[in-house]
Image (tube, coloured by chain):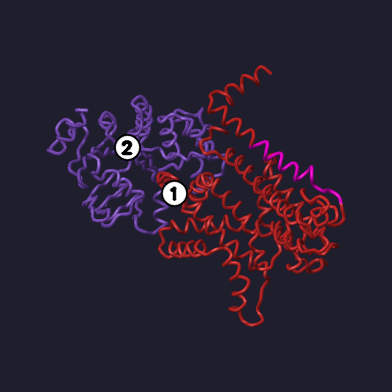
Amino acid sequence: MSEKHIIVINQLDKYFGDFHVLKNINLSVAAGEKIVICGPSGSGKSTLIRCINHLESHDGGDIIVDGIPLDDRVKNIDHIRSEVGMVFQQFNLFPHMTVLENCILAPVWVKGVPRPEAEALALQYLERVRIPDQADKYPGQLSGGQQQRVAIARSLCMQPRIMLFDEPTSALDPEMIKEVLEVMVDLAEQGMTMLCVTHEMGFARRVADRVIFMDEGEIIEENTPTSFFDNPQNNRTKLFLSQIIGD
Amino acid sequence: MQQIIKWSRKNLFATRMNTLLSLVSLWLIYVTIDGVASWAFINASFLGADKASCIANPHGACWPFVTAKLNQFIYGNYPAGEQWRVNIVFALGALGLGLLMTGCISFKKQLAVLMLTAYPVLTFILLSGGLLGLSYVETNQWGGLLVTLVIAVTGIVVSLPLGILLALGRRSELPIIRMMSVVFIEFWRGVPLITVLFMASVMLPLFLPEGMNFDALLRCLIGVSLFASAYMAEVIRGGLQAIPKGQYEAGKSIGLSYWKSMRLIILPQALVISIPGIVNTFIGLFKDTTLVMIVGIFDLLGIISFHFTDPNWTSPQVPITGFVFAGLVFWVFCFAMSYYSKSVERRFSVTGENK
């Protein structure tokens, strides 16, 4: 395990009942690295990133995030969660709170940041995702793209070192995908460590340092975006890419 | 006038069937109002010190019975010289609730805390006495509306938090907590309230060690509260299940602990969804308090029926009038709860559209 690796995953195994969903996954992520994970549905890619902040528990192997081993100790889980932000396919904003309240909730209640300070920080991040003027609205009053950008801002408010994206644009109308991807590109350019499950290949080409292809719970291929897209090695990768591009 | 004719053409007499239904309905309304008015007002007796005037008006209500006994209906046998204590409790309760409901004050949170902590203590001291120079009033002297409200309010105030805990327990990932919650809920839900009250008042003292005994009203309060909690738990569990899994995951992913995420994210949404069910349970509980009559505690209905036997007031109309009066009082309280719950629902509407 090297010092510069912020996430180290060793021989990770996970089962859903009898179903072997993740098979012997090994993956190390350097600080600041951007990784795009793709693969057919049911390949275990979402499960993999959900293991990193322990939304799913794993059955074998080790996950070490920022030097902290992820085991069943609640203290470690809490610590890792405060360093790892996550953006969901369905946004999962809290509908009974305004945008601003969504953003300051965790800083105030988890980190104990004073409210005015948390609000200032939240406004700063809302500015960064380009919706500072919506702070007092409720999530239900925003478009899907706006909601997803709020969700990104909400995660950023905890000032995480790592951001996980679980198909952030899959629930969006096409014209809203762009505005969310732009925010993600900004974030990447500012040096955030990012793991992103997505089928947005343009985004992968532009931002990713590495593209990982998963199928049936295994990492089949990993490479730089250029080699991955232009010169895929594995037949399953070729098949998958032809289907994606065929769309 | 033109508009009235236009409106009734459109809404009352549009088709032949529509006209028929309208006429039948109007006739039913007329019959009901006519019957009620002639019984309650036209043929009723209003003044009198005993049954004489009621016997003279055999087809109408006997209101003098209610006015003559009103004091007992409200306070039971609470000593007349000490009834001011009850009045203070009533007044403070009404004032506190009123301020909380109208919602135009800045210290709402503090007031709510006060109402849930200081008010019950003060109520206990004032009502039972024996402290601060207040004379001791045994609970078997309490009665009427006082007892009804004490039981209902205690049941409501205890069953909501306990029900929340039980509902969370039933959905817990910890097997022992889950099992205990399930057993508790299914036990209390499976037993009729009358049985619970009988157990509390007749059986429990047999199991307690010799010489140890605690108050009959208190035993009923505990029984009613636990019984109501089981129902409340299931209502709230319904609300919890309606919250999407993503909300729990979002709470976890930003680092909130279980309790914080319940308190800040899940329960505020689940409770709002559950308001109709919660109020339904409250109303059911309020009316179920009349069952304590069975174990010799005189709630409002109990004390009213008790006074039917007063030889000064034996007239055929007395029981009918008494029951109607009891019904009216219960209806006023239940309707108030129902009406208030609607405004709460609007205020906390999750979508934010009505804010």
Farthest-out residue, bottom: B210
Q: Secondary structure at mark 2?
A: loop
Q: Which residue matches tag 2?
A: A167
Q: Which residue matches tag 1?
A: B241
Output the letter for the chain in red. Answer: B
Q: Of residues A10 and B312, which is closer to you in this image? A: B312
Output the letter for the chain in purple. Answer: A
> On residue B146, which mark appears?
none
Q: Magenta region: which residues?
A: B28-47
Q: Of residues B265 and A60, which is closer to you in this image? A: B265
Residue shown at 32% from the left, 37% from the top: A167
Quadrant in which the N terminus of chain B is drawn: top right
Let me know if residue A2 appears in the view: yes
Residue shown at 71% from the left, 63% from the top: B298
Is residue B153 found inside the magenta-colored segment of the image?
Answer: no
Residue type marked 2: Glu
Residue B119 in which image quadrant: bottom right
The location of residue B232, given as percent across then percent down, is 54, 55
| Up-down relation of residue B53 to residue A103 (above or below) | below
| Up-down relation of residue B270 to residue B307 (above or below) | above
Residue type marked 1: Gln
Q: Secondary structure at mark 1?
A: helix
Q: Chain of mark 1?
A: B
Quadrant in which the C terminus of chain B is drawn: top right
Residue shown at 38% from the left, 38% from the top: A90
